[in-house]
Amino acid sequence: MADLTDKHVAMIVEDDFEQAEFTGPKEILEKAGATVDVISPVSGPLQGLNHIDKADTFERDKALEDTDFDQYDAIVLPGGAINADALRMNRQAQNVVTEFFEEGKPVAAICHAPWLLASAGLIKGKKLTSYETIQDDIRNAGGTWVDQEVVVDGNLITSRKPDDVPAFSNALIGALSAA
């Protein structure tokens, strides 16, 4: 496994995220040695979901508005429809992912998380995947949607659902190892 001890990853979430898409990549990245910070505009407990059922709660490490993103090597955006729908409307989150795109740093989005990228105007001309119910949104934003476990297009890494977490995480580890 790659040694990511010098890598810092920002995991940005709102409330009601898909827990498997949060805990899976976080654990895999930390096992590889990366430091993963949970960053959120929400103060207090963050609610994880198993699809639509409430799961565990988590604490953020940093407030979105107080975070210096220059220290991070990559961003991970877990999915979940409620989380992604709220986060896509957050102007600061849009600005952060735009900055990472422009700097060529990895941006990894799974499930409904590509909504944030669409709202930020970042997927035109990109090939990506997502949860199948938002494929029209991806196409309407100018992206090419495909039904694959993981898609890497430049610094953009996308996956469809919780079952894809291992491939999603491995693609991100590969991108961080190459950086």
Image (spheres, rainbow, N blue to C red):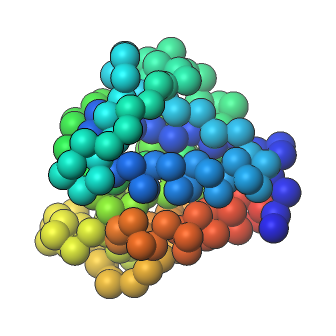
Q: Is residue 5 left or right of residue 142?
A: right
143 or 114, which is in the foreground?
114
At horizontal 27% and vertical 69% (from top left) the residue drawn is 131
At horizontal 82% and vertical 64% (from top left) the residue drawn is 2
- Tell me: residue 172, above or below residue 99: below
Number of numbered tags placed on the structure image: 0
Quarter of the rendering occupied by the N terminus = bottom right
149 or 106, which is in the foreground?
149
Q: Quadrant of residue 162?
A: bottom left
Q: Is residue 119 left or right of residue 33?
A: left
At horizontal 24% and vertical 56% (from top left) the residue drawn is 51
Measuring from the top left, give residue 116's x and y in whole percent.
Answer: 30, 48
Measuring from the top left, give residue 121's x and y in whole percent.
Answer: 30, 52
Residue 123 can be seen, yes or no: no
Hey, which residue is sitting farthest bottom in the picture?
147
Measuring from the top left, give residue 118's x and y in whole percent.
Answer: 27, 55
- Tell me: residue 124, above or below residue 30: below
Measuring from the top left, give residue 98's x and y in whole percent.
Answer: 44, 44
57 or 130, which is in the foreground?
57
Residue 128 can be seen, yes or no: yes
Q: Quadrant of residue 159?
A: bottom left
Q: Quadrant of residue 92?
A: top left
Quarter of the rendering occupied by the C terminus = bottom right
At horizontal 62% and vertical 51% (from top left) the residue drawn is 27
- Tell me: residue 153, above or below residue 120: below
Q: Is residue 10 left or right of residue 121?
A: right
